[in-house]
Amino acid sequence: MDVEEFYNSYELEKLPNYIKEIINFVDLRLKEELNLIKIKPLVLDAGCGFGTFYEITKNYETIYIDLSLEQLKRFEIDKNKVCANVEELPFKDEKFNTVLCINVLEHTNHKKALEELFRVLKKGGKLIVVVVNKDSLFKEPIFYDFKIKHNPLSLRDFKGYKILSYKSIYFLPSFIKILPLPILKRFLNIYHKIDKILSNILKDKGQFLIIEMVKD
């Protein structure tokens, strides 16, 4: 199964409840950290899916793209949606001031994708990416074992680009999945603050790496 086919049939609602709880925890942490990064319109959300991170960009002039037409159909906005491949972006050079690319590069030829993302970024503009971290302390199979192309990345894969900041999130070992769902929910709620503290201490060892770069 290729990436487009996988995501055309992907439905978060059909996943086991414990996986949904963990994914919700990750999404909340990512939103918290991404909201700390200054965004300047015009924005490109490259790989928007069905709009998980829409609240980050909803107040800006933003264009949303995704490889999966089915995911775009589920994204409940009625304009500025484009079905496109991040490795072959249908935009002119230096169009955007900010580009977001969240949990996408693992599924691509990341070198080619990064070239395209920087091509459409204006000089002085920011590229903000989130990737599954190859160098994380723990490797939760939910985020690593895919039936499609999925290659976790590390800071080393962004060598040569000007990095303004980086941070990682999610330091939970896999055994938490054995907790009964009600206990898992309470545990994640309590662990939230701990994860924020660890993010500031172990900046490159969490399961998800957030990197802010600038185009010279």
Image (spheres, helix red, strand yellow):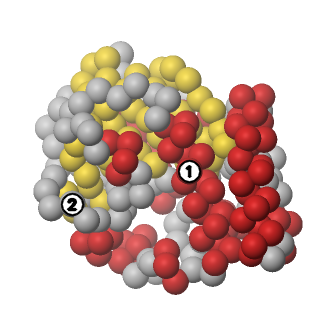
Question: SS class of the residue under badge 2?
Answer: loop
Q: Percent from the top left, x then y, of residue 213? A: 45, 26
Q: Which of 188 and 87 is in front in this view?
A: 188
Q: Which of marks 1 and 2 is nearer the N terminus?
A: 1
Residue at (15, 61) in percent of width and height = 78
Residue 51 lies left or right of residue 104; in this view the side is: left
In this picture, residue 156 sits left or right of residue 102: right
Quadrant including the C terminus: top left
- Kindly identify the residue that appears in the image at 46 percent across and 35 percent down: 35
Question: In the rendered view, does 94 fall on the left or right side of 114?
Answer: left
Residue closest to the eye, 8 or 74: 74
The disc at residue 145 is none
Q: Which amino acid does label 2 sit on?
A: Ile
Q: Is residue 40 something that shows in the picture? A: yes
Describe residue 63's horizontal placement relative to residue 202 as left or right: left
Q: In which quarter of the image is residue 108?
A: bottom left
Tag 1's secondary structure?
helix
Mark 1 burial class by Cα count in 10 Å: few <14, some 14-19, many 20+: some
Asked if the residue at tag 2 contacts the one at tag 1, i.e. Cβ–Cβ closer than 8 Å, the answer is no
Residue 133, how many percent across, how many down? Answer: 65, 47
Real-space Cα separation, disc 1 to disc 2, in angstroms: 21 Å
> Is residue 179 positioned above or below 85 on the image?
below
**Which residue shows up at 16% across the image and 52% down it?**
80
Instruction: Please tell me how crowded label 2 is: few (under 14), some (14-19), or many (20+) other residues with Cα within 10 Å.
Output: some
Q: What label does residue 77 carry, if any?
A: 2
Q: Which of 184 and 144 is in front in this view?
A: 184
Check residue 28 in the rendering and tell me which mark sits there, or answer none. 1
**Residue 51 placed where, x, y %?**
35, 59
Is residue 205 at all visible to an observer of this figure? Answer: no
On screen, residue 2 above or below 24: below
Q: Where is residue 210 in the image (x, y as percent from the top left)?
A: 56, 38
Q: Given the image, on which type of amino acid does mark 1 rest?
A: Leu
